[in-house]
Image (spheres, coloured by chain):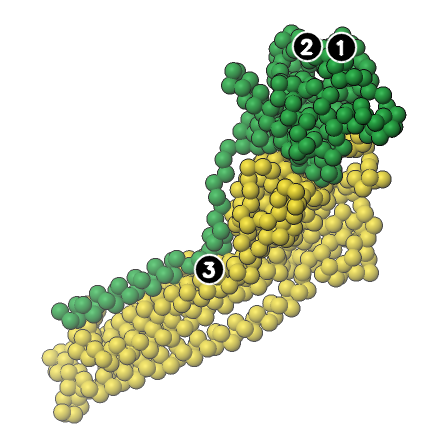
Amino acid sequence: MSWRDGFLLALRSVVRRPARTALTVLAVALGSGLLVALAAIAQVADTRVISELGKGGPATAIKVAAAAPDPAAADSDNPRPGPARNLDDAALRSIRRAPYVASAIPVTTQQVIAVPPPRGSAITGFAGDDPDRGQPRPFNAAIVGVDLSQVHDLPVTLLAGRLPAAGSLTEIAVGQDYLDRLRLDVKHPEVVLATEVELGTPQVQPAGAIRVRARWTRAVITGVVAQQVGDGTFLASQQLVAASRAWQLGGVDGSSLGLPLPSTQYAGLVVVADSLDDVHTVRAEITTLGYSTSAPEQLIASVQRYLHVVDIVLGSIGLIALTIAALGIANALLAAVRERRREIGVLKAIGARDRDVLRWFLAEALFSGVTGGVLGTAAGLGAVAVTGTVVNDYLVQQGLAGVDLGGVPLVTAAIGVGGSALLALLAAAWPALRAARLPAREAVGAL
Amino acid sequence: MTRTLGLRSLLAATGALVLAACGAETPGAVHPAPPVGSAGAPDVYVALGASETVGTGLNDQALQLRDSWPQLFFNEALSRASTYYNLAVPGITTAQALQSELPQALGVHPTVATVFFTVDDLVQGVAPATYEADLDSIVRALRQGGQALVLVGNAPHISSLPAYQACLAHASACPLGTHVTVPPPDAVDADVDAYDAAIARVVAEEGAVLVDVAAHGGQITSDPQDVASDGLHPSAQGNAALAALFVSAYRAASRAG
């Protein structure tokens, strides 16, 4: 008897006892579904929690301030920076050369006057804070400029729309404080998308009746973000900030007018370490180079310990469910062996060998395992999708970014189906061996 | 038959669950980015002038930044990729602007410029011929051999301005300064006409574009809604009216190539 014959025989047995088969398959489906759902949710939760600590960027990101380190607080996650210190290209090169540094992204900032919005791009729902004109008043703000092609390495979370194109001089993203300033509902950030904002960069003149002149540009708001890159209402390309900065540097220091010239080339850096284990070493190296750093390394270590406990608990629940499913398979096959003693006896009487009977029962178990695994995995992933939708709705209502469930996790699905099949074979091993070793005479005689 | 249907139902349910999993929501999909139009040609615009161009007369500095006519012109006439510099200085004459505003303007290599000087030259008694020569120097330099579009505004009759009328009626209550004696309306209007004639000649000679504020000036200088509380400068509505004139002239010139 070949494996094919074994499968055909198993299929006939399955069809002959649909209720028992359905219950066995259901038990396997419940077990595998629960395990897949718990594994996927635990994985997403772990990633989400760690990424939350990274504020949208990698958890291995370290913020470097344009300030000297405070030796007394070097090991703190958020030490108070020391005196201001120029963070320039030479420092950037030194930090990039340091061991375990994956990347170092410079951050620039520029003070501007913002006029939201110019005529022709009215914001839906804005009541206006200027009783004369029904338009928002100009305000002082800062633009944070970064290389937007490396935004995945920065603590930036997109809440609505999209990020400005890398290198764009006419696109900009705003933070939630922009919505607050315009007294808009943060739960509906989409109302500011595609509206324009005017940005004026002041230049202080050496003398004259007019001390300050502004360079004005306009930018369209492409997205709303939550960002921890630097202090500023706007996030833009480094080219946009560089053009504004060049205009301000063409003037003189205006500290007396509240418009001082920038004291540092870069307002800060975001340095990404090779791994979480390297964060401490990289921070120590940057401290040695003379700059203050901050990173949630101790917080992450603490949270990871708690997450590990949660993973163990969730995994245990799933394993218990699978064990129950395995016992169900074993029980069903043991009952089948008892019921089919005559068939086993007849098969052996006409020449079937022990391994042929073994194949028959293993094939039947494999059918239950694979079918239950497919159904359970699909149900588990469906449950994850529904949970994700509910959670996303809640997060968006709270003005937070949604959870990326990443579509169908193929590895998890494969493990769900394959694991169920393997478990079914293991659970069936003893009943199948018992059936295979049943002497033909005894089997027939039992009748 | 029943078994076949059962198997089909099972397969359909499995497919539906897999599709549901595929449709899991991803971040950023809740509020997708709306389409953003082209940023357009990157013009560099400079505004040269005196207090009217700064926005004096608007309630506070913040509103000057939003409602002054060059700001409105920048927003309404030019593309999003454009850059704008307001180099105007209150109280400045054309001769002074030649020394202070023009070099800064040329430093940013403008492709569009607006020039609007008259009242301060008038108040300081600058002769029309001198005014014309200085204005011509400014416009010629800004034109850069035809590379930049230069819009020059002429002056409306200012004898109907509330401030002028107040000075005319009671010199001691003149908002332009106590005991300022203003010339009679006919003389002021004649001076304005002489300036406007000079402006027309400069515009024609240098290939600039005339913004005929004088032709629409009656409302801007006499309508209480268009004049600021100081009785002299344009209000927010007056700035909007001025901007509309400059925008209209710019668009007509752009269409003409």
Residue found at the very far left of the displayed protein: A350
Q: Residues within 10 Å of mark 1 (few under 14, many from 20)?
A: many
Q: State the image coordinates of residue A285 (x, y, percent, origin top left).
A: 74, 52
Give x and y (percent) for residue A67: 79, 49
Q: Residue furthest bottom?
A: A446
Residue closest to the eye, A209 or A141: A209
- The chain to which mark 2 is attached is B
- Left or right? Give the position of A417 relative to A107: left
> Circle 1 sits on which residue?
B128
Count of numbered badges drawn on the protein: 3
* Residue drawn at 62 percent across, 31 percent down: B240
Check chain identity for marks 2 and 1: say if they share one. Answer: yes
| Residue A306 can be seen in this image | yes
Residue A218 image-quadrant placement? top right
Badge 2 local density, few (<14 within 10 Å), some, or many (20+)? some
Chain letter for mark 1, please. B
Q: Name the residue type under label 2.
A: Ala
Indicate which disc residue A405 carries: 3
Q: Position of residue A248 (x, y in %)?
A: 74, 34
User: Looking at the image, do the residues carrying marks 2 and 1 touch, with CB atoms under 8 Å apart?
Assistant: yes
Residue B89 or residue A33, whichever sits in front: B89
Does A257 sit above or below residue A349?
A: above
Disc 3 and disc 2: Cα gap in Å?
73 Å
| Among numbered discs 2 and 1, the one appearing first in the sequence | 1
In terms of depth relative to the viewer, which is nearer, B187 or B203? B187
Tag 3 secondary structure: loop
The chain holding disc 3 is A
**Secondary structure beneath label 2:** helix
Quadrant of the drawing holding the N terminus of chain B: bottom left
Instruction: Give the quarter of the image for residue B13.
Output: bottom left
- The hue in which chain A appears in the rendered picture of the protein: yellow
